[in-house]
Amino acid sequence: MIHLDTAATTPVRREALEAAWPYLTGTFGNPSSHHAVGEAAAAGLEDARARVARVLGARRSDIVFTAGGTEAANLALKGLALASPRGKHLVTSPLEHEAVLASVEHLQRVHGFEVSFVEVAPDGAVTPEALRAVLREDTTLVSLALANNEIGTVADVRTLAEVAHAVGALIHTDAVQAAGWLPLTGLGADALTLSGHKIGAPKGIGVAAIRGRLPLEPLVHGGGQEGGRRSGTENVAFAVALAVALERAEAEREARTARVAPLRDAFLERVLAAREGVLLTGASPHGPGERLPGHASVCIPGLSGESVLLDLAERGVIASSGSACAAGSDEPSHVLTALGIPREVAQTAVRFTLGGDVEEEQLEAAAAAVEQVLALR
């Protein structure tokens, strides 16, 4: 099997499992307990917090462990917007992950916030001018992803943060897809969210890195764990696993990017040439915009994306039609339709996302499978 769907999830790293194992066995204590077993677990949790903070260039007090990237995004958006709003105005883009868009919709529907959607370029980029055009004096929070999960387009978050801060607004960035591929420090964001299973940790652990001095309304109330920001007994083992996986992903990042990007380019060139009319979505690898090194996303007008995926799976190639969080939906991708792609074309989408360990021979075999499938139709 050739797995080209790492944007959906990644295999758990052995180092992460080995680091977690002691906290699932001998060091099993509740980190809130004031005895030796609990204090040993608390020490492991705080070491994990410090390691994550180092990778993100944050303070330990900024790090909140959550049950995943979706909860982390919900905490960042709802928590910041509700705790100390300058006004009831939010800004995001129509391309964001469902966790962001649903959180914004909740704030609008339940709490009376107004929402402005920034205009996006055809490749998914958000320019400073476009952001500036929708900001207001009462804007409380901006949420823009560092890298899009479906088309791989990368945002200049540092510049966008400067634009948001110029009017006094806070900014959150969803860095779930960017971790392990892009630098996560020096972005200027007030909140950054991650998911463990995208970088080799188990499913069920995430991080919200939110500047500790900012007021934050918790989503989960109870015993006041995580500095009062997220109550509930912490998942120590998975927090340790995430810290190890994040460290390894960051240590390998530059070498991984340099190796995978040219392999992706060669693979994408063959996919685009496999059938007349195949449409690249997102930033061009050779254009002015930036694209995640492992992302290759296309639409194949005239074909069903799902049928192409089934035919590829029969040939041992695993890909997807877009976000795994929207799997099972008959609706076309909201990302692609927001880019102006017709609904019938958006439903032909196929997304290939490469892992850091992908081999050239695997991609050659995958490209050959794509050529065979498209030649049959």
Image (cartoon, rainbow, N blue to C red):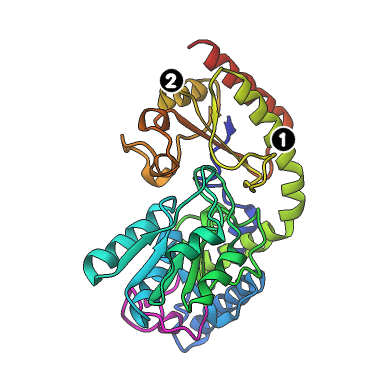
Residue extent of the magenta highlight? 211-235
* Position of the N terminus by quadrant: top right
Callout 2: SS: loop
Left or right for 299, reference 91: right
Magenta stretch encompasses residue 217? yes
Q: Residue 3 bears which disc, if any? A: none
Residue at image location 37% in from the left, 78% down from the top: 231
Callout 1: SS: helix
Q: Is residue 246 above or below residue 35?
A: above
Q: Is residue 360 above or below residue 37?
A: above
Q: In this view, does 86 lie above or below 266?
A: below
Q: Distance between the residues labelled 2 and 1?
A: 26 Å
Is any atom of residue 18 visible in this view?
no
Quadrant of res 183: bottom right
Three-letter code, disc 1: Leu
Quadrant of res 201: bottom right
Quadrant of res 222: bottom left
Is any atom of residue 173 visible in this view?
yes
**Which residue is label 1 attached to?**
263
